[in-house]
Amino acid sequence: QVQLVESGGGLVQPGGSLRLSCAASGIIFRINAMGWYRQAPGKERELVATITSGGSTNYIDSVKGRFTISRDNAKNTVYLQMNSLKPEDTAVYYCNAGIVAMGYTSNYWGQGTQVTVSS
């Protein structure tokens, strides 16, 4: 059974930093693109950043220059380094991955980790 497990959320002051991690476990043949989404209270879930298996990245405009997505393919893990955090970054952050396992390609989600930016 494939699972994505996130860690690293918490409470941070404006201007601070956090690093989120998301590790995939199970019998995995290959992980394709990975990404981070977030959902703030009363808002729809939005895509924050993506990274392909080859390392190409994309970000939404509001986090460019502040957030960095990376991955360690040997550890089946994706990271989101968040710097210069703002109150509007407050949300539940979810990781997502396209994973090939048992002959099938499926889209998997983590359980979510809360990020709160407040003084």
Image (cartoon, rainbow, N blue to C red):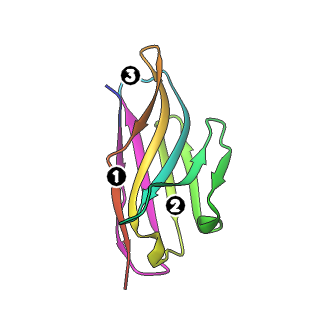
Q: What's under tag 1, amino acid-wise?
A: Gly
Q: According to the image, label 2 marks what residue? A: 81
Q: Is residue 118 above or below residue 81?
A: below
Q: In what element is the residue under mark 2? A: strand
Q: Foreground mark, 1 or 3?
A: 1
Furthest toward the top, the residue is 103
Q: Is residue 105 above or below residue 58?
A: above
Q: According to the image, label 3 marks what residue? A: 27
Query: How far, Cα to Cα, is label 3 from label 2?
Result: 27 Å
Observer-nearest residue: 49 or 42? 42
For disc 3, the neighbor class at 10 Å (few under 14, some 14 to 19, many from 20) is few
Residue 78 spot, x, y in % from top left: 49, 46
Quarter of the image with the C terminus is bottom left
- Is 46 included in the stretch rendered in magenta? no
Residue 56 spot, x, y in % from top left: 68, 44
Residue 103 spot, x, y in % from top left: 46, 13
